[in-house]
Amino acid sequence: MSVGWVFSFLFSMKKRTHNCGELRKEAAGSKVVLTGWIDSVRDHGGVLFVDLRDREGVTQVVVHPGNQTIDEAMAHFKPESVLEVEGEVVLREPSTINSRMQTGEIEVQAGAVELLNHSKTPPFPMDDEKADKVNEDLRLRYRYMDLRRPRNLDVLRLRHRTAQAVRRYLDESGFLEVETPSLFKSTPEGAREFLVPSRLNPNEYYALVQSPQQYKQMLMVAGVERYFQIARCFRDEDLRADRQPEFTQIDLEMSFIDREDMYALVEGLMKRVWKDAVGADIQTPFPRLSYNEVMNRFGSDKPDTRFAMEINDFSETFAKSGFKVFAGAVSSGGVVKAINAKGLADLTQGELKGLEEGAKSLGAKGLAFIKAEAGQWKSPILKFLSDEEQQALKEQLEVEDGDVVFFAAGEWESACTILGRVRLDAAKLLEKRGKITRDPKDYKFLWVIEFPLMLFDEEAGRFAAAHHPFTSPVPEDMDLLDSDPKAVRGQHYDLVLNGVELGGGSIRIHQPDLQQKVFEDVLSLPKDVVQERFGYMLEAFSYGAPPHGGIAFGLDRLVAILANRPSIRDVIAFPKTQKGQDLMAGSPSPAGDKQLRDLFIRNVEPVRTED
RNA sequence: GGGGUAGUAGCUCAGUUGGUUAGAGCGCCGGCCUGUCACGCCGGAGGCCGCGGGUUCGAGUCCCGUCUAUCCCGCCA
């Protein structure tokens, strides 16, 4: 490719007059210049059609025979090459109108064409139906090609609209957008971090922020009053469909507010986002359910409430049962719970096994069930159940022919969680049979509130913060901090949508003595560790910290739901694989000796030792 | 770290109980075609069956290991 060629190309490029999605019959007769990618070529030997595609749409370009230069040039044009077309908009013959195309009433008769750049044959088909099935690793390696498909460009557009809606709404609500550092201090509590060596400070390290939590609280102390940020966060944990090593949060914090203010603000934010991004009207206010209630009814702290199938409690019923497994669970302080999968009695052996596996993965020893079929109950445990017990089940769970009842017995949280899993797995099976539906556009928001402030960490043998150590206890429970920490509820709230945790936050502790007490007395962190890690916060709080609270949302999850995509990889421009690699750019990759020397780092044999 | 699924042509897949020369559709290359829009028709090229071992007279097929992707558990707000 000579320099001369490049220059002639630069000088010959014309200004585009329209995009490929906007021409309508009213434009007939006008001269236009279109630029874009060749979507397809249909060569009839004489007349030749090119579908030209850009960000906004597709327009058919027609080349009639006789124009020798164009004829010869076009013969070598391939899909995905970049083309400039100068021509006249003409109405199509009525019989050739394509009603599936927005621009289908017209076409552009080419007067001159210019190949702006040639494309190799794409590594996979660009047609949506086929491309969606192509191995994801190949599509990630050629991410720029995959994104070029209108279906994927639309997701980027949706994400943009979402971010803009957030910015507009929060701006109107008096928030300041403030950027905070990505290079932060290592805080080994919580998620594993990415460490960044400091060249200027040998053998010292930054950590990439897991979230701007501490910075945003400092902004409150600084008097910003209302802060938000669309912030990149980093966590070096194992990946999932809804987890990437770097992800984006809509992060916000407010001073002089209580929980009610937060609920109202966030409900308004969601209303605006849904309206602006997908044109949907959602109902507010959102229902509020306590942690205890969602666990009891749905067996999850992020319940999908688009379908009922609720869990019932039968601890009373089975307290003195002849079935020792159930009676024993109750007598040792646990519970017996059951759920009716309506209409699932026709489940196969394999499906039953699958449900049991799911239950076992959460610690169940097995999965007791009763099938109601042809007026009869069938179950391996039926012989242990008295008539009264069976009657109680039948009435409370409204058991009819064709239903299956599943049981879990044991410690409260564990029994709930197990049936929560069974509930979701059974829902999948029922949905396959068309007996229930989970419409992705049926947006069931809810708040989960009154979480326990602490959970006992069996491994560490001490209490750990359920959310994070900055969450303020609810005022009524303040006295319990010393006597019964487990019973203390936090001023924490999670926003849940269709079984997905969209975000969570809390009213924070702003009193230095209370914060210190939580660190040292409740969470049992050594004094020197508290000082080293959080000393600056305690000090900051002692200079007049305002009461404050905040929340953060996973933007990736939010957009994935709006776009109805199964993985957040689909809504991130350049996502990483499950091993955290960028297959397009090829990161991570080894560093050179000089780089390592500058950073005071030495490579070691990659042998993992168990700790 | 553990469990599941997948890996055969550029792409998506088929490939029988282990048995001739591993197939199809799309794409690609060449030719024909003046109204297509998934254009059509004719012809052609294209294979380390993920990789490494093993069993066998013989392996795409069976066994072991390994790599990659993905889903889940652990982990993670």
Image (tube, coloured by chain):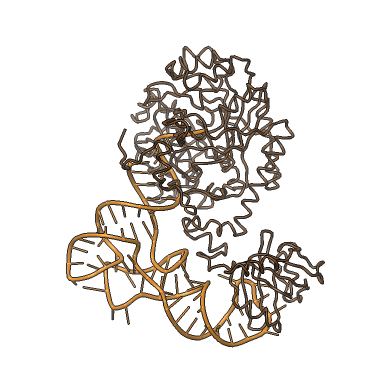
Chain colours: A brown, B orange
Q: Residue A17 at what x, y percent from top left? A: 76, 63
Q: Residue A499 at what x, y percent from top left? A: 54, 40
Residue A9 seen in this snapshot = yes
Residue at 67 percent across and 71 percent down: it is: A114
Q: Compared to A283, does A149 lie above or below?
A: below
Q: Compared to A574, does A418 lie above or below?
A: above
State the residue in front, A281 or B29: B29
Give the total of numbered labels: 0
Q: Quadrant of the image for the N terminus of chain A?
A: bottom right
Q: Quadrant of the image for the C terminus of chain A?
A: top left
Kindly indicate the quadrant of the structure image that contains residue A238. Answer: top left
State the residue in front, A502 or A553: A553
Q: Residue A107 at what x, y percent from top left? A: 73, 71
State the residue in front, A333 or A543: A543
Kindly indicate the quadrant of the structure image that contains residue A265. Answer: top right
State the residue in front, A361 or A315: A361
Q: Compared to A251, does B50 lie above or below?
A: below
Image side of residue A588 versus residue A266, left or right: left
Image side of residue A393 versus residue A221, left or right: left
Residue A374 seen in this snapshot = no
Residue at 59 percent across and 60 percent down: it is: A149
Q: Residue A527 at what x, y percent from top left? A: 44, 15
Q: Compared to A595, does A140 lie above or below?
A: below
